[in-house]
Image: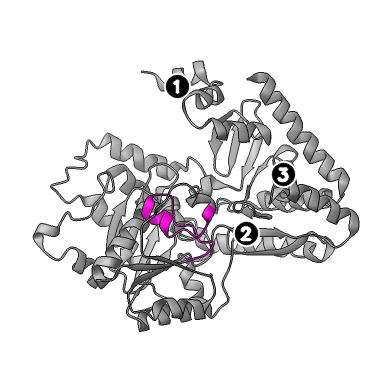
């Protein structure tokens, strides 16, 4: 089979095939908001469609493409593995590349995290963290934060603090307790029962880009340990340079008992997740020879995944991308910050590194408030589309709403942005925020765009 020939022959069938055999609702969404492009090439921070239009990607595959797309060093590492004819996934063996990647991950992890478990995704690492915590402590309950997101498999979904993802999938795993993010008193009350195995949280919540007060995470870690529970940091999205440090927990100088990572570790090619934890936790789970395979992941230590991880760490270091993330993200935030005082719908610009949120709120003036209420009555969080849709259609910037029903727009770009990319983001964002404040005219433009796309979709079907 010639894959390139197959793509050439059937390159424009992707929406038809997905409508027939995969998620037809996603096809409807993309066509309705005008995001239905036929991408044919990707390079660095850019996507290219079949009309040779170039798009700046601030979505990064939900944070996967920290190095951009098709980074040559990752490509070369994968080619090297494929050409080496290595034994792979022997299972009754211990592979070299997984050992080397584990060594390098321990070296960059917070001090005291000395053991590594490999999986295929972020949700798998969270599942492992839940299981390890329960076995190591002999307790069952897991505390999680409202608004947090940890994945969609059953255990991680039980720890996800958003009912939108849970509806209809119950009953979920028992013994999960929700507390508000940032509420130390609620956390202490939940811990005081002495039956808690672990407290799991994202250092910065991805849905909404909610950054805690400076005292919250250090005191949460202290409370957790005082009550003999484990502190799990879910760094699946925030880790590996996204926030301007290797790990977001470094902003608050804390060391978790377990740290989960995935997304960027893949280099954008091969799914890989990793959990790093304290040695005593690992030794309790795998405490006898007959328990050597009590938890695992069939493809977790694939040579291709390990090579992608090794190459990713090398690129992050050699291209100084951790520091670049901090500097570029701050430049974007600083440039957009004055807009908060200029436009009444814009409540806040916040972020760390290349994890940035623009939060919008109901305005005070009558015409703008009427427009806001009209949109919110149609669909909660719809105002955000007055930012993301024109960013894409007029400025060719791909971005996202930060969570279900939120009027928050989120930027998680590749860490490799150039100065011209940063200017592109700043100029385009200023333009769409200005246009969004035209009140009824802006609402009419958005409504016309969505209605036209919906009509076209209906005619085409």
The local secondary structure at tag 1 comes to helix
Residue found at x 24% / y 56%: 99
Residue interval drawn in magenta: 145-163
The local secondary structure at tag 2 comes to strand
- Residue 366: x percent and y percent? 90, 57
Indicate which disc, 2 or 1, sits on the residue closer to the N terminus: 1
- Residue 263: x percent and y percent? 44, 51
Left or right placement of residue 123 versus residue 90 in this view: right
Q: Can residue 66 be seen from the camera position used here? A: no
Indicate which disc, 2 or 3, sits on the residue closer to the N terminus: 2
Q: Which mark is residue 356?
A: 2
Is 151 inside the magenta-drawn segment?
A: yes
Foreground residue among 77 and 148: 148
- Residue 203: x percent and y percent? 49, 67
Distance from the alpha carbon under mark 2 to that under mark 1: 37 Å
Indicate which disc, 3 or 1, sits on the residue closer to the N terminus: 1
Q: Residue furthest top?
A: 9
Foreground residue among 128 and 248: 128
Residue found at x 17% / y 54%: 293
Distance from the alpha carbon under mark 3 to that under mark 1: 32 Å
Q: Residue furthest right?
A: 366
Q: Quadrant of the N terminus?
A: top left
Q: Can residue 28 be seen from the camera position used here? A: yes
Q: Quadrant of the C terminus?
A: top right
- Residue 177: x percent and y percent? 43, 67
Q: Which mark is residue 4?
A: 1
Number of other residues with Cα within 10 Å of mark 2, as a class: few under 14, some 14 to 19, many 20 or more: many
Foreground residue among 1 and 358: 358
Q: Which mark is residue 409?
A: none
Q: Which mark is residue 391?
A: 3
Is 315 inside the magenta-drawn segment?
A: no
Distance from the alpha carbon under mark 2 to that under mark 3: 15 Å
């Amino acid at each position: 089979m010639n894959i390139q020939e197959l793509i050439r022959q059937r390159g424009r069938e992707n929406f038809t095939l997905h409508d027939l055999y995969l998620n037809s609702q996603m096809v409807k969404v993309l066509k309705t908001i005008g995001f239905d492009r036929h991408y044919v090439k990707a390079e660095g921070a850019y996507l290219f469609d079949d009309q040779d239009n170039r798009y700046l990607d601030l979505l990064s595959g939900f944070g996967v493409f920290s190095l951009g797309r098709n980074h040559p060093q990752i490509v070369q590492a994968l080619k090297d593995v494929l050409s080496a004819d290595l034994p792979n996934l022997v299972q009754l063996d211990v592979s070299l590349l997984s050992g080397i990647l584990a060594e390098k991950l321990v070296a960059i992890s917070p001090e005291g995290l000395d053991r590594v478990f490999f999986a295929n995704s972020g949700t798998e690492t969270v599942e492992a963290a839940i299981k390890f915590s329960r076995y190591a402590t002999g307790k069952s309950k897991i505390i999680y934060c409202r608004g947090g997101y940890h994945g969609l498999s059953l255990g991680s979904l039980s720890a996800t603090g958003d009912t939108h993802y849970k509806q209809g999938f119950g009953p979920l795993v028992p013994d999960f307790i929700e507390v508000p993010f940032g509420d130390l008193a609620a956390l202490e009350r939940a811990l005081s029962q002495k039956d808690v195995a672990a407290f799991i949280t994202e250092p910065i919540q991805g849905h909404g880009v909610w950054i805690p007060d400076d005292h919250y995470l250090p005191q949460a870690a202290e409370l957790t340990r005082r009550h003999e529970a484990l502190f799990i940091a879910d760094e699946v999205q925030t880790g590996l340079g996204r926030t301007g440090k290797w790990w977001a927990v470094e902003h608050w100088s804390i060391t978790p008992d377990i740290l989960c990572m995935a997304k960027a570790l893949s280099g954008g090619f091969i799914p890989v997740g990793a959990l790093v934890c304290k040695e005593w936790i690992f030794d309790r789970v795998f405490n006898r020879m007959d328990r050597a395979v009590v938890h695992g992941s069939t493809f977790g230590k694939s040579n291709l995944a390990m090579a992608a991880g090794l190459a990713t760490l090398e690129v992050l270091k050699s291209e100084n991308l951790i520091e670049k993330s901090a500097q570029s993200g701050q430049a974007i935030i600083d440039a957009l910050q004055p807009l908060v005082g200029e436009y009444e719908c814009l409540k806040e610009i916040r972020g760390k590194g290349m994890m940035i949120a623009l939060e919008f709120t109901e305005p005070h003036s009558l015409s703008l408030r009427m427009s806001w209420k009209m949109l919110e009555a149609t669909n909660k969080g719809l105002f955000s589309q007055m930012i993301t849709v024109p960013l894409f259609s007029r400025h060719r910037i791909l971005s996202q709403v930060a969570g279900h029903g939120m009027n928050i727009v989120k930027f998680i770009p590749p860490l490799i942005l150039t100065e011209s990319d940063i200017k592109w983001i700043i100029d385009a964002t200023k333009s769409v925020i200005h246009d969004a404040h035209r009140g009824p005219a802006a609402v009419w433009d958005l409504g016309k765009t969505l209605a036209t796309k919906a009509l076209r979709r209906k005619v085409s079907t």
